[in-house]
Image: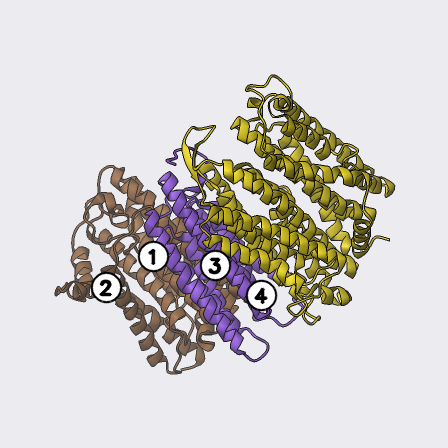
Chain colours: A brown, B yellow, C purple
Amino acid sequence: MNDFGTFLFRAHAGFLAALILAPLIPGVINRTKAVFAGRQGPPLLQLYYDLFKLLRKGTVYSRTTSWVFRAAPVVTLSACIGVLMLIPCTGASPALISFQGDIILFAYFFGIARFFTVSAALDTGSSFEGMGASREVLYAALAEPAFLLSLSALACLNSKISLSGIFIASTEHPFANIAVIALVAVTLVIVLLTENCRVPADDPNTHLELTMIHEVMVLDYSGPDFAYILYASALKLWAFASIVVAVALPLRTGSFITDSLIFIFGILAGAVVVGIIESTMARFRLDKIPKLLIAAAALSATALLLTLTRG
Amino acid sequence: MILALLILVPAVGGVAAFFISQVFLRRTLLISTTVVHAALTASCWMQRPDPILYKWLALDPVGLLFLSVSSLLFIAASIYAIGYLRNEPKEQQDSDEGFFFTNTPENIFIACLQLFLATMSLVCASQHFGMLWVAIEATTLASAPLIYFHRHHRSLEATWKYVLICSIGIGLALLGTLMLTVSASKIEDNLMLPKLLENCQLVNPAWLDAAFILFLVGYGTKMGLAPLHTWLPAAHGESPSLVSALLSGALLNCSFLGILRLHQVCVYSGHSGFSAKLLVFFGLFSMAVAAVFIIAQKDFKRMLAYSSVEHMGILSLGIGLGGTAVFASMYHLINHSLTKGMLFLAAGNIIAFYKTRTSSDVKGILHRIPATGVLWTAGLFAIAGFPPFGLFVSEFMIFKNAFDNGHFLICSIFLGLLAIIFAGMAYTMLNMAQGEPSGKVEKESKLSILPPACLGLLTLVLGLYIPDFLLETLNQISVLFGAL
Amino acid sequence: MNLPDSIMIFLILTNLSLLASSRLNACIKTVAIQGIIVGFLPLIATKCPLTIYSYLLAILIITVKGILFPYLLRYTLRSVDVRREIEPFIGYGASIIIGVIALIMSFWLCRHITFPEPILSYTAPAAAFFTIFCGLFLIVSRVKALTQVIGYVVFENGIYMFGSAMLIEQSFLVELGIILDVFVVVFIMGIMMFHISRAFDHIDTNKLGESEKKG
């Protein structure tokens, strides 16, 4: 194999691993929560079963909905797959697609996904879904600055503006600036929890429409459409988790296989951490979450400032 | 030795007064402490005391002048205090809102008075900027319980404002002191005033300017320069009159000393342009703010407080102008302290008889309590700078200096503001002095008339004649600030 | 990334958390931690070998800022019976944003200053200015007297940090005087808060002027 062949192989391997392993994350989170609660819990592969079950079912559409409602799951899923193409599986090799400034594309893929989810929720005309959509947009608007600021801090720290570049450079100089990395990691964890509707921002297990945020927006979906949405959110979780792991665990042993295994192990460990957070914390009051996000933005702004002024 | 005594006598007296339970003994202690302090100060005029504590404490002409003014005011205030404490009831009714309140225990009051004097002497004698800071902050702390003498919510608010605002201001001055250290990092022992003055060519001018700004903001807060004077009217209004007299006549001066010391360094290092401009600007600004607030003032003690803001402005204006105005400014300082002391003590008598601080409720002082009425009216003319009082001389000299140097804008603002302030004060104070008295003719005790009368007499004398020893010292001071 | 820089970043974070927190108890704890770290600073920030005085001073400052102040403040907290700052003049979200802007300003300021001598680290003066700002901001933007005292302590910490950042060595006597003064300020404010709470049933300084007095 020549160099290009190696690159293609590694990039595809990472991409496929993400696609295949992503539904494992919710399983790991739920298992952790079950252990903390002293329950047996659902099997680790529960989401896979659910997805297969849903894909085999038919779909029901409300008569009041339009094409927006039908397009949303597909668009969301494609956006999340697009995101995964930008993320390398480890610092050892670049991703499938990488170019200067793809961190912006990364953020806006999620923007597209959210735009369609929210539009579809409004399209149903249900008041609960409208409420969920409004909350989702509020949190997203506050999470975005925090996320972009921490990405720019990373970009400045490594003098690279592509995700692959950042991943690779951070393994080349691991912990070049521990304070900045710590700040960015904390911000990214907060953004991860908010964007993926986990406790303390949202409770994925809630059964009361009034308190739901993300779940309430997808109430009207069924069958394959719902499967797409569940799968897309698993992919999104994977994408965020990979960035956190790349920041917090910048190791490189030299062997691609070992590196990838460590990376995937790191992501699963991240899932365990999320599970622990969900088990030990209560959901915040709605008005407290913007405060949390502003604080996260402040942390990432501090990180950016420190990278800009160093030396 | 004498220097140590100047600080230790009141300090020990203060601590002792705290533990003495016998009223007569405690009051005698207060009088004797201030008299001993004044005697020690007088002896410093005969012969300068030797520096002590690694030369951190020494009396230069500026310090001596400030110390003497404070000492003089303290004698007057302590004599007045005896009469005041004797007539002050244990529990009394508030005149405006009708609730009852008690006073701070007398032993704390007398103890704090003496500690206040001790810290003030420490300020005047400090030759080390760090020491100066510690001492000025200590004056705030020693005087806080004095302001909270009448234990009710308004005086509590005033004291809270005083402690918080002044502590923050003085904190900024500490930052300024640190910046001064940075600026003089090439000099050894760089917070000692004499060392700084000797090696002032080594000072970094940019950091010196930064330090001066912080000194001006920091100590200026406590000195009452606008716009940082907000604590001042409340504290002067709510505290007992003799405390107001001390705050106005001694405490404000001592904070001014902090600014003055650094300005001296600026002058010596040849970078005084910036600091002088700032002093002139804040001086005029303070006068303007005072003028605005004096006109609409209903409370005559607050009016006197704003008048202090005005006079602090004149002091800083004079120092900023430089040359002969420095002489004038220092002369102004003496006269202002004496006059303001007299006015506040007289105001105390008025409150004792009329039980109010609202000027529209006070009528016919000249008829009801004639002696106080005479003092009050004389005080008006003295504070407004009428001849033959001392303030006329100093204000005229400052005006003349500005005029001679071609600062016509400053001259016109200065005169205009003085006129407004005179009009405002005269309207209120003359209305109080004249008119139909609301009660029968009464007689004040000698203890409450003698101190303000003596202070008034002194400023009258100073308007007519400057004694040689004072002239010499004032000349020395103006040489220190680069005159001639 | 060396030790002083990391400490400074930690101090910056304590300030941000003070701006964000409405729980007075948490604020007192944060200030105590900040005070202890600030007390340690002179031990790492020094040009000449440490003397017995430096250790004494560090111990003194840590005792006052890390033990006495929190004790005093918590005692007041209990006696005046308030737990949190409910309606500050400037909300917590806005406070954090203002704090970040101030942080940017202080870094900007420190880039444009020429420091005449070796300093502890380039983050240190910026962190000191930021701490001073936070202290002042807490005083003007909060209503409760207790928070204002906390603000004063933070402000004082900032000044102290500036001194350490510039490697300024005061003489022992002056340092002693400064710490004594600061202690007495906080002590007096504590006593006054007690009086305020007795006279008003609250310690909201913006309502002191109103007369709901008892005596």
The disc at residue A78 is: 1
The local crowd at label 4, few if under 14, some if 14 to 19, many if 20 or more residues have their Cα within 10 Å, is some
**Which amino acid type corresponds to the residue marked 2 in the rendered image?**
Ile
SS of the residue at dot 2? helix
Q: Residue furthest left?
A: A40
Residue picked out by circle 3: C183
Camera-nearest residue between A291 and A57: A291
Q: Are discs 2 and 1 less than 8 Å apart at CB?
A: no
**Tag nearer the camera, 3 or 2:** 3
Q: If you read the primary sequence from the N terminus, does the residue marked by circle 2 or circle 1 appear first?
A: 2
Residue at horizontal 47 percent and vertical 53 percent from the top? B18
Does residue A146 show up? no
Q: Determine whether the residue tagged by mark 1 lies in a helix, strand or loop.
A: helix
Residue B85, position in %: x, y?
Answer: 51, 40
| Mark 3 chain | C
Check the image and report above or below for A21 versus C192: below
Do marks 2 and 1 share a chain? yes
Residue A243 appears in which quarter of the rendering? Answer: bottom left
Q: Are marks 1 and 4 on the same chain?
A: no
Q: Which residue is mark 4?
A: C174
Mark 3, residues whose alpha carbon is within 10 Å: few (<14), some, or many (≥20)?
A: some
The residue singled out by tag 2 in the image is A29
The answer as to whether the residues below labels 2 and 4 share one chain is: no
